[in-house]
Amino acid sequence: MVTSPLLAQKPDQQGSRERPPQSSRGNSPRNLMQNFPVLAALDADGNNEISAAEIAAASAALKTLDKNKDGKLTGDELRPRFAPPSGRPGRNESTPPPSANDARPGPPGAPAPKAVAGFAPREILKMLGARGLEGAAERTLEGYRRVFGFTDFDKDGRHSKTEYVDRGRHLTRQSRAGIFQASDVNGDGFVSEKEYVVNRVITDEAKEIFESIDRNDDSRLTVEELIASKKLKDGKLAQAVFEALDISGDGQLNVPEYLLVWGRWARS
């Protein structure tokens, strides 16, 4: 019922299939597939098709949508991710990670500070609600491992840049390059399953926390929103943390900037 209106195309007078309009964001079949969380979860390799292997892994894939880990899927977790008219990413829309030209969230990028207002960066992340790898449900980790396996084309247990960035089909090449850089923490030019899973845990958890603070849903955080969230009970600490996260110094945090610093802190 869900897939048929998305994937069906009408034949033209010559018997060929019409191509859907490509001019506006979200109109292509690939974008429509990714706009629906259930379809995006099932389409693990991002090729706009749900293969027999992906159908077999459907149970684990759907469990990755259970954000609050209550064992069931609600309307909020299944809501389609359509962009607002302005073209700015909305709350339910995935935001691409920092591009390959951005500073790395791990070595050899700029290191995390030893302390912010007297607290280690990882302590601050815990205050904000981060649980890290230890707090991730096993079904979530298994879902990430399955996705890794689908994109490990040569089945050698690791992603090479050629395999993941150049041959990848999901997102854009720039986004894939950013994900690859963020995941390759040891800088050996390959991403192991463990590195991939850790990066997914860090990134997905960071996004959830960002969304919980972003009260006006504009994909930007201000110091006022951080203070109002009450995640950091001390206003001065919240101010110091915000300034440390705001590496651009423009008084607001966009998602790529936030994830860049969060990744450094989580790995410190």
Image (cartoon, rainbow, N blue to C red):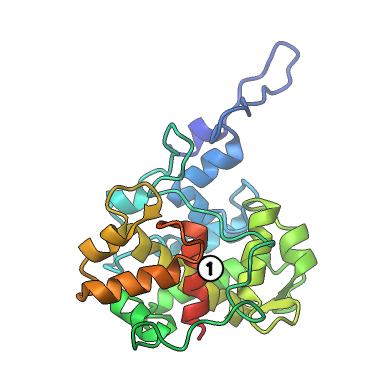
Along the line of sight, which residue is nearer the eye, 216 or 90? 216
The three-letter amino acid code for the residue at tag 1 is: Leu
Residue 59 lies left or right of residue 66; in this view the side is: right
Q: Residue at x 31, y 74 (%)?
A: 128
Q: Secondary structure at mark 1?
A: helix
Is 96 drawn above or below residue 231 in the view shown? above
Task: Classify residue 149 by image quadrant.
Answer: bottom right
Circle 1 residue: 260
Q: Is residue 236 above or below residue 97?
A: below
Q: How many marks?
A: 1
Residue at position x 68%, y 62% from top?
A: 100
Q: Splitting the image into 4 quarters, where does residue 90 fall?
A: top left
Place of residue 262 in the rendered image (x, y in percent of width and height, measured from the top left): 47, 72
Residue 158 place in picture, x, y as percent: 70, 77
Quadrant where the N terminus is found in the figure: top left
Q: Is residue 106 left or right of residue 81?
A: right
Residue 17: horizontal and vertical position, in percent? Answer: 69, 23
Q: Nearer the viewer, residue 253 or 86?
A: 253
Residue 69: tell me if it is visible: yes
| Label 1: few (<14), some (14–19) or many (≥20) C-alpha neighbours in 10 Å | many
Q: Where 25 falls versus 183 (above or below)?
A: above
In this picture, residue 54 sits left or right of residue 164:
left
Residue 84 in the image: state x and y as whole percent. 41, 36
Could you tell me which residue is drawn at 66 percent across and 68 percent down?
Answer: 180
Residue 171 versus residue 105: which sits nearer the camera?
A: 105
Q: Is residue 107 left or right of residue 210?
A: right
Residue drawn at x 49%, y 49% is 39
Residue 150 visible in the shown view: no
Relative height, residue 35 to residue 6 (above, below): below
